[in-house]
């Protein structure tokens, strides 16, 4: 996802939040999210040879998010944000049958998204907050690079964008000081995708179709975040 797109959405949300009543809670945060693409079958040699499965390595992506409390429903928030590109490579490089080889280590999978949703934030004392979040993520997946199948090089460069619902749980700590209007806070969160695309066929390395690409999408993630409450 382009950096400018995320920044424009967050700044627009911030302008709306500035119009809320002074006592409402507004938050802006940056986060580092850890996820891993899903394992898929990359080759089916047939005969007695087993299917070859591969999974790209873990990915870490940075992002930004804004949350604004609703004036009519204290404790309920709208939120908008997104994650910039996170990327990793496949790992398989070896035999797939007695006379065939496959090298996927030159193939990269990248993921980014914008998100829009809502949350309920509950307090535990003066400094601790837990949150339950539901959001839609417009996820952009891309596969690129080159695979080597038994000496033949295939060049991949396909992308796909689609919308999925996610649930997220968060827990954070706010550093408070008497008289301060803005408070820093830190936290952690876990996210889970409510919809998944399953793989139904082995990908053609010369034309990696959308369904196989979507089947690589992460199914869960974890993140650390830090921000300012105002």
Image (cartoon, rainbow, N blue to C red):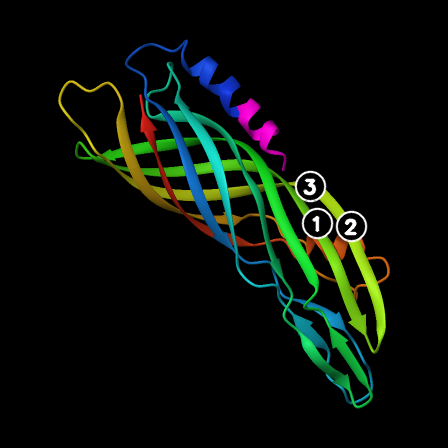
Q: Residue at x 78, y 52 (%)?
A: 157
- 144 lies left or right of 175: right
User: Which residue shows up at 47% across the image and 28% down it?
Assistant: 79
Range of residues picked out in magenta: 1-9
Residue 70 image-quadrant placement: top left
Real-space Cα separation, disc 3 to disc 2, in angstroms: 14 Å
Element at label 3 = strand
Find residue 188 and report its horizontal and vertical position in percent.
35, 46
Residue 8 in the image: x percent, y percent? 56, 23
Residue 66 visible in the displayed image: yes
Q: Using the numbered discs, state the Cα–Cα distance from disc 2 to disc 1 in whole angstroms.
A: 6 Å
Residue on which disc 1 sits: 142
Q: Which mark is residue 162?
A: 3
Q: Residue at x 77, y 73 (%)?
A: 43
The residue positioned 61% from the left and 63% from the top of the image is 56
Q: Residues within 10 Å of mark 1 (few under 14, many from 20)?
A: many
Q: Is residue 230 magenta?
A: no
Q: Earlier in the sequence, mark 3 or mark 1?
A: 1
Q: CA distance from mark 3 to mark 1?
A: 12 Å
Q: Nearer the viewer, residue 103 or 74?
A: 103
User: Does any portion of residue 204 appear in the rendered image?
Assistant: no
Q: Position of residue 7 (x, y in %)?
A: 54, 27
Q: Which residue is mark 2?
A: 158
Nearer to us: label 3 or label 1: 1
Helix, strand or loop under label 1 = strand
Q: Are marks 2 and 1 in contact (CB under 8 Å)?
A: yes
- Picture layout, residue 196 above or below residue 105: above
């Amino acid at each position: 996802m382009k950096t400018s797109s995320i920044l424009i959405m967050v700044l627009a949300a911030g302008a709306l939040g500035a119009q809320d009543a002074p006592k409402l809670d507004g938050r802006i945060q940056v986060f580092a999210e850890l996820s891993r693409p899903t394992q898929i079958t990359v080759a089916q040699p047939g005969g007695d040879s087993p299917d070859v499965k591969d999974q790209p390595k873990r990915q870490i992506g940075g992002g930004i998010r804004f949350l604004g409390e609703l004036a009519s429903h204290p404790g309920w928030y709208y939120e908008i944000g997104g994650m910039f590109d996170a990327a990793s490579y496949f790992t398989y490089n070896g035999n797939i049958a007695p006379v065939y080889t496959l090298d996927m280590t030159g193939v990269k999978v990248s993921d980014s998204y914008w998100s829009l949703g809502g949350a309920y934030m509950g307090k535990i004392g003066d400094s601790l907050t837990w949150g339950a979040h539901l959001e839609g993520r417009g996820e952009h997946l891309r596969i690129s690079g080159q695979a080597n199948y038994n000496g033949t090089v295939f060049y991949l460069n396909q992308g796909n964008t689609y919308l999925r619902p996610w649930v997220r749980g968060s827990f954070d700590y706010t550093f408070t000081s008497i008289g301060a209007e803005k408070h820093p806070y830190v936290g952690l969160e876990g996210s889970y995708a409510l919809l998944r695309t399953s793989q139904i066929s082995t990908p053609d390395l010369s034309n990696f179709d959308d369904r196989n690409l979507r089947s690589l999408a992460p199914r869960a993630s974890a993140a650390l975040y830090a921000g300012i409450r105002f």
